[in-house]
Amino acid sequence: MKVACVQMDVQQCMKQKNLNKALSMAVEAAENGAELIVLPEVFSTGFCYEKFDRVAESFPGPTLDDLSCFSETHDCILVGSVIEKVSAERFTAEKTASEKSSPEIGLKGANVNENSALYYNMGFCLESGKLVGTYRKTHPFKSENIYFSKGDSIEPIFLKKHNLKIGFEICYELRFPEVARKLTLAGSDLLITTAAFPNPRSEHWKTLVKARAIENQLPHIACNRTGKAPDASYFGGSMIIDAWGEVKANAGHKECIIISELDLKHKEDVRGAIPAFEDRRTELY
């Protein structure tokens, strides 16, 4: 599969401008044969806390509608994250359903009261125009915890048309090897990380992105933003890595698109050469 990462600067709170740029860059990726295109974390708004309620969307909403049209037109997979708004009524309905299906989990990470909405950093995956899966970030970073509720599920997203499972994580979750490992043990065929990983932690990013691929023996598409926000700057460094841990494409620091061919069956050769999963002693950990 030919895959791409759109490494872009994000203008704070300027949703339409960011969406137009993302779609323009994604067109270039699709025209160069990319079947799977990854966008950065909260690519359409940045962490627009000052206008949080205004930029957040309930779903289905206009941003996802535009992305769905693009995915259908170009017959591709599109992955990224946006700010999701959930009404108190919908939250109550989700909470009831969650408690019935998984009473030990429920929606424990939600920041909400009876009369307000709540917000998630919501990952999405579109396949040929259809929303095939979402993922609410389970590990918000520092001040994100003030604004975002925590997702309560870590499961792969299944792509029916391509018969693939995607293990999806968001930014800070790179620092939790348990997230990628759970996704791997659940049958993921590749890992995707959408991120806004800031300076001065570029060396952390490089090491963690490679480690998640190597330890799970899976290809990894890690898409980071670049540019500046009011409270941070970003180094880019997006990478496409194969199941052996070899970097197939590296974006550097500027706005750009990286594209690479990934052999999704290569993981079987890697696991045959180094049978780490067969040698795990699960009785000890």
Image: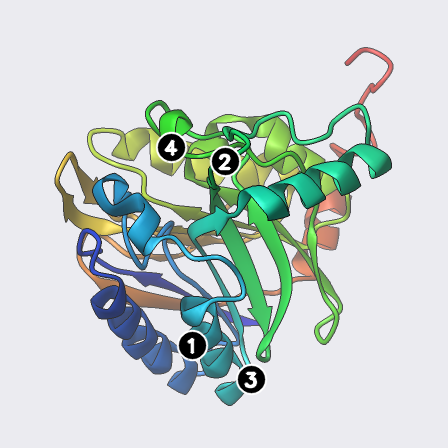
Q: Quadrant of residue 235?
A: top left
| 57, 257: nearer the viewer | 57
Give the vertical position of 20 relative to 175 (above or below).
Answer: below
| 136, 97: nearer the viewer | 97
**Is residue 96 among the parts visible in the rendering?**
yes
Residue behind mark 3 = 75
Q: Position of residue 106 (x, y in %)?
A: 72, 30
Give the vertical position of 284 relative to 85 (above or below).
Answer: above
Q: Nearer the viewer, mark 1 or mark 2?
A: 2
Question: Mark 4 Cα within 10 Å, few/some/many (few <14, many 20+)?
Answer: some
Helix, strand or loop status at disc 4: helix
- On-image quarter of the C terminus: top right
Q: Quadrant of residue 148?
A: top left
Q: Earlier in the sequence, mark 4 or mark 3?
A: 3
Residue type for callout 4 = Tyr
Helix, strand or loop status at disc 1: helix
Q: Are marks 3 and 2 in contact (CB under 8 Å)?
A: no
Name the mark on residue 115. 2
